[in-house]
């Protein structure tokens, strides 16, 4: 009888040891779930911000009646039924530049079935609000001066575009660009040539790939040596204004404009085709970026119409198809000008307020902490280092946890560019109730 008891005890110990080994063996975040058929549990960090983390939990062949519990260090973040085999988990209210440890466990009827390996996650740090600012005023004694867009090549190579009547010898002769060499702004005339005519029209936008590859909104291209006619989608946009351009280094270009018009070039502007947007609203802006978690390029454009209940549309362009993205949460009568993303997953739109969606299938939420001033543009480096610019000389910086609004001039900033520790905003100073000189502000981070 004693021998039988010893045998049973030894078998029980072996069973417990096997269970312990199973529960502690998931060094890659995977573990066999006890009592289920070859199921695996995986927990990975998918996206990390300054105070937020997105995790992905995957369970192979889940059974009914299972619940899961997510721990951050010793705090329970989730404790609820398992619905899907692939679940995205969100945690917020974290500290910047801080390491947290996450683990997910599966339960059935209160009994632990499996738990993942511990996943260490370090949040992003905040960026500095400390910038040194320089303001430049471009007087126009022979008419108004207005700058609408700007591009940064480097701190000694910056372009701003618009319309400036500032020639004392020929008062009516227009300039449409300014170039900064690190010391001074030089007025330029970017000329579109028609046989027998030289056209210096106002320029609404600029897009620069490099110092030798710059595209201007009056259908002119700079190749590093000279300015050449570009005839940017001229057949598609005849009589229709082009508002913005975006392109990738592989030579895929997109143009957006009035009446819902979108044009696409697969070959660096050599040929163009019109894409069917399904709307007739003015498309204000376009932005593209690679989703860091999937490697997929995401291209979104923003359409908006003032004083309309159908005021805004966010359009995704993929494989020459245009589809509407949900805009739940955006105000019905809002008017928006700019769209931007730093990682392809989290997106912002600005105009009648600033709104963010954590991912494209979720509602948009208003971003607080800014004055109630209309915003014309949004640009940044990453999600912890972005700027907005707008009316009343608004320039503000988000460092990942707080906003800093910088001293404002009495005017409007229409265009904004950000590159590393340099930010440039361009627009027009107001004098009284009329337009005055062009205004430029350059901020350099300490």
Image: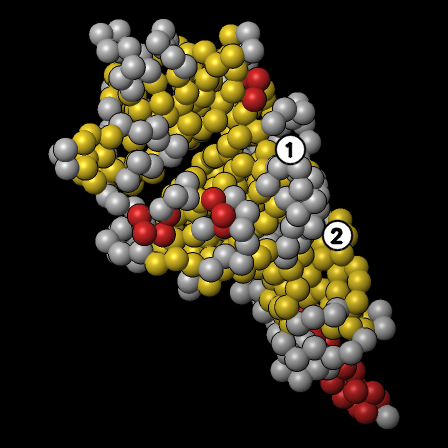
Q: Is residue 250 above or below residue 87?
A: above
Identify the residue position indicated by label 2 in the image.
77
Question: Does residue 92 appear in this view?
Answer: no
Residue situated furthest front in the rendering: 196
Identify the residue position indicated by label 1 in the image.
353
- Say which residue appears at 31% left-offset and 24% top-offset: 176
* Number of marks drawn: 2
Would residue 96 be found to the left or right of residue 249 on screen?
right
Give whichever of 320, 52 is nearer the camera.
320
- Say which residue appears at 61% left-offset and 60% top-offset: 56
Q: Is residue 293 above or below residue 2?
A: above
Instruction: State which mark lies toward you, 1 or 2.
Output: 1
- Say which residue appears at 23% left-offset and 34% top-offset: 192
Question: Does residue 165 appear in this view?
Answer: yes
Give whichever of 421, 215 is nearer the camera.
215
Q: CA distance from mark 1 to mark 2?
A: 31 Å
Give whichever of 348, 229 is nearer the camera.
229
Q: How dense is the environment of label 1, judged by Cα within 10 Å: few (below 14), some, or many (20 and up)?
A: many
Q: Secondary structure at mark 2?
A: strand
Q: Secondary structure at mark 1?
A: strand
- Picture quadrant where residue 86 is located: bottom right
Whichever of callouts 1 and 2 sits on the residue coming sooner in the sequence is 2
- Say which residue appears at 20% left-offset and 30% top-offset: 198
What sort of colour scheme is used for the picture? secondary structure
Picture coordinates of residue 97 (x, y %)?
Answer: 56, 36
């Amino acid at each position: 009888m004693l021998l039988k008891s010893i045998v049973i005890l030894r078998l029980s110990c072996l069973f417990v040891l096997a269970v312990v080994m199973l529960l502690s063996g998931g060094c890659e975040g995977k573990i066999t779930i006890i009592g289920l058929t070859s199921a695996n549990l995986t927990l990975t960090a998918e996206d990390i911000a300054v105070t937020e983390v997105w995790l992905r939990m995957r369970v192979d062949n889940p059974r009914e009646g299972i619940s899961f519990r997510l721990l951050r260090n010793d705090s329970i973040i989730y404790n609820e039924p398992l619905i899907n085999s692939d679940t995205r988990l969100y945690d917020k209210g974290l500290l910047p530049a801080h390491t947290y440890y996450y683990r997910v466990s599966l339960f059935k009827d209160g009994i632990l079935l499996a738990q993942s390996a511990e996943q260490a996650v370090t949040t992003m740090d905040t960026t500095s609000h400390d910038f040194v600012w320089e303001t430049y005023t471009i007087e126009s004694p022979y008419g108004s001066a207005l700058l609408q867009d700007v591009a940064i090549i480097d701190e000694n190579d910056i372009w701003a575009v618009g319309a400036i009547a500032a020639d004392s010898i020929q008062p009516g002769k227009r300039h449409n660009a300014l170039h900064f060499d690190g010391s001074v702004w030089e007025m330029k005339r970017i000329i579109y040539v028609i046989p027998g005519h030289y056209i210096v029209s106002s320029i609404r936008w600029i897009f620069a790939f490099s110092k030798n590859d710059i595209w201007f909104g009056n259908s002119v291209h700079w190749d590093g040596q000279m300015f050449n006619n570009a005839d940017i989608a001229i057949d598609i946009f005849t009589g229709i204004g082009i508002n913005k351009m975006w392109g990738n280094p592989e030579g895929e270009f997109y143009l957006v404009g009035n009446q819902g018009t979108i044009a696409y070039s697969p070959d660096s502007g050599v040929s163009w085709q019109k894409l069917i947007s399904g709307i007739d609203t003015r498309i204000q802006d376009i932005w593209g970026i690679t989703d860091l978690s999937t490697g997929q390029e995401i291209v979104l454009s923003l359409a908006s119409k003032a004083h309309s209940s159908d005021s805004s549309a966010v359009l995704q362009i993929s494989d020459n198809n245009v589809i509407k993205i949900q805009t739940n949460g955006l105000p019905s009568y809002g008017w928006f000008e700019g769209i931007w993303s730093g990682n392809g997953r989290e997106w912002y739109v600005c105009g009648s307020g600033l709104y963010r969606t954590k991912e494209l299938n979720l509602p948009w939420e208003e971003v607080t902490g800014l004055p109630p001033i209309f915003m014309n543009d949004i640009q940044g480096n990453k999600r912890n280092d972005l700027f907005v610019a707008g009316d009343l000389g608004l320039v503000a910086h988000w460092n990942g946890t707080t906003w800093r609004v910088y001293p404002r001039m009495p005017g409007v900033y229409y265009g904004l560019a950000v590159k590393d520790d340099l930010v440039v905003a361009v627009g027009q100073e107001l004098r009284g109730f009329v337009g005055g000189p062009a205004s430029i502000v350059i901020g350099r981070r300490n």
